[in-house]
Image: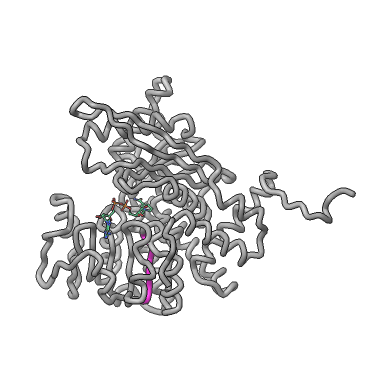
């Protein structure tokens, strides 16, 4: 049946409802978790290079701060919507809970195509956005980070803007993560999300009774997450036979040279035109038609839908992107026996290392690249094992088990703080 709606926020709410029901939890808990606690919409006036002013719309959504300050990236994209940012903020809460970070979820977005801006216009927009959301962010309140089309440079401008606004003469590094290493950033942060995707692929492949070095894999999206996912999958032994980005898909049944492809994209921005011996260029969606042991969708949400799920031939999907598989597609894939490592675990490497960056900024004490990657691996593998344990115990799929773990964890502080109280008629004082 065709999917009526692909609104990511409705998808997030359905995922929470399912896990709340599976845990026999209360409606009060569901209602509390199904809406963000705060949604800020801002208008950002930017002086363009030709002298006229253009007003951009942005959002910052904070889903829940029951456990600690909120945390989540900022996306610059022409298709940003309020509901998309609400969904992404909601998923962040569950992601932080799954890997055991002392954060709630948040997300930000600006409706803009950054490719159409000059560098100076991008700086003005980044500063304008940081200024507009500054009343609700802070190192102990809400700590943004990069997401699609934002990077360390954008974070550096935002830190500078926020610090100037405070007017104390101090640089507040800990208010944003994902900064350049030379400016309070963390070694291993750039690689972290993709590295985590490869680690989770390794664990899931073991779960399926295989070893990564006898597998083939394909990766959708060749930006920050996809390129490093492909690089580490390849380094851990998988033969990466397909990669794609917005422009095309590159297929090489003999295995791609990911380092070379990354160097090509650094210069040419897109994969189109990239060649290797035995490689062919296909259209971008043909990636999902390549048969491989595992697929890592690392582009945007709603990549795998009821329209293409039947055609996908794989044993394992490791969700590098947020929300890449729609619920209808998931039903089809689970029926076909495909194992899915859900986004809230698979791409949690980014926020895990962002957490380490924040801790280092607060303590002014910095770890080595290896120490960071080891800490990330420990946290993610432990989370993987906990989810698998509950998945077996409750006989549910991995996404449901991940949500159930998160909901069990957050229900405790919500009740302790008195934010939800389920009074039954018989509890009432007569
Ligand atoms: P990015 O902008 O660096 O890369 C996105 C990539 O997807 C680009 O290569 C783009 O060309 C490609 N793409 C876009 N549409 C496509 C399509 N239809 N088919 C194939 N490729 C397409 O973004 P990113 O930071 O790599 O983020 C990707 C996803 O991972 C997003 O869902 C994001 O929310 C999620 N994520 C990112 C991080 C992080 O640390 N960057 C952390 C957690 C989750």
Viewer-side residue, 150 vs 58: 58
Residue 301, position in %: x, y?
A: 37, 58
Viewer-side residue, 198 vs 427: 427
Residue 168, position in %: x, y?
A: 43, 20
If the picture is divided into quarters, which one holds ligand 1? bottom left
| Residue under the point 25% across and 66% down | 285
Task: Reply yes or no: does residue 93 show up in magenta.
Answer: no
| Residue under the point 54% across and 66% down | 401
| Residue under the point 35% across and 43% down | 178
Q: Give the side of residue 282 with respect to residue 370, left or right.
A: left
Q: Give the side of residue 35 with respect to residue 428, left or right.
A: left
Residue 169, position in %: x, y?
A: 39, 20
| Residue under the point 66% across and 61% down | 25
Residue 234, position in %: x, y?
A: 26, 66
Viewer-side residue, 266 vs 91: 91
Q: Which residues are magenta?
A: 315-320
User: What sort of colour scheme is used for the picture?
Assistant: one colour
Corner quadrant of residue 294:
bottom left
Task: Reply yes or no: does residue 317 show up in magenta.
Answer: yes
Quarter of the image that includes the N terminus = bottom left
Q: Give the side of residue 408 with respect to residue 347, left or right.
A: right
């Amino acid at each position: 049946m065709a999917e009526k709606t692909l609104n990511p926020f409705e998808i997030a709410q359905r995922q929470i409802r399912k896990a709340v029901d599976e845990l026999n939890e209360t409606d009060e808990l569901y209602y509390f978790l199904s809406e963000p606690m705060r949604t800020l919409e801002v208008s950002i006036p930017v002086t363009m290079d030709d002298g006229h002013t253009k007003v951009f719309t942005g959002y910052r959504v904070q889903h829940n701060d029951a456990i600690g300050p909120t945390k989540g990236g900022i996306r610059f994209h022409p298709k940003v919507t309020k509901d998309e940012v609400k969904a992404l903020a909601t998923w962040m809460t569950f992601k932080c809970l799954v890997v055991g970070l002392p954060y709630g979820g948040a997300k930000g977005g600006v409706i803009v195509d950054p490719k159409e801006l000059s560098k100076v216009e991008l700086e003005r927009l980044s500063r304008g956005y940081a200024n507009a959301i500054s009343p609700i962010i802070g190192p102990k309140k809400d700590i943004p980070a990069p997401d699609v089309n934002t990077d360390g440079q954008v974070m550096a401008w935002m830190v500078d803007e926020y610090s100037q606004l405070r007017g104390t003469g101090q640089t507040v590094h800990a208010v944003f993560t994902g900064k350049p290493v030379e400016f309070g950033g963390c070694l291993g942060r750039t690689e972290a999300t993709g590295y985590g995707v490869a680690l989770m692929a390794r664990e899931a492949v073991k779960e399926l009774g295989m070893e990564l070095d006898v597998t083939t894999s394909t990766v959708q999206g060749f930006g920050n997450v996809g390129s490093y996912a492909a690089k580490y999958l390849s380094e851990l032994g998988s033969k990466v036979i397909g990669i794609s980005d917005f422009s095309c898909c590159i297929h090489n049944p003999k295995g791609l040279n990911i380092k070379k492809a990354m160097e090509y994209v650094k210069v040419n921005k897109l994969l189109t035109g990239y060649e290797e011996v035995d490689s062919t260029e296909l259209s971008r969606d043909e990636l999902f038609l390549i048969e491989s042991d595992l697929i890592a969708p690392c582009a945007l949400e709603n990549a795998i839908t009821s329209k293409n799920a039947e055609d996908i031939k794989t044993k394992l999907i490791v969700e590098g992107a947020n929300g890449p598989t729609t619920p209808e597609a998931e039903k089809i894939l689970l029926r076909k026996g495909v194992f899915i490592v859900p986004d809230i675990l698979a791409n949690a490497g980014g926020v895990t290392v962002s957490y380490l960056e924040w801790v280092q900024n607060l303590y002014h004490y910095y770890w080595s690249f290896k120490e960071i990657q080891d800490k990330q691996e420990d946290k993610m593998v432990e989370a993987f094992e906990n989810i698998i344990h509950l998945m077996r115990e409750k006989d549910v799929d991995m996404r449901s088990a991940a949500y159930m773990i998160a909901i069990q964890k957050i229900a405790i502080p919500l009740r302790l703080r008195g934010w939800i109280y389920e009074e039954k008629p018989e509890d009432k004082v007569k």
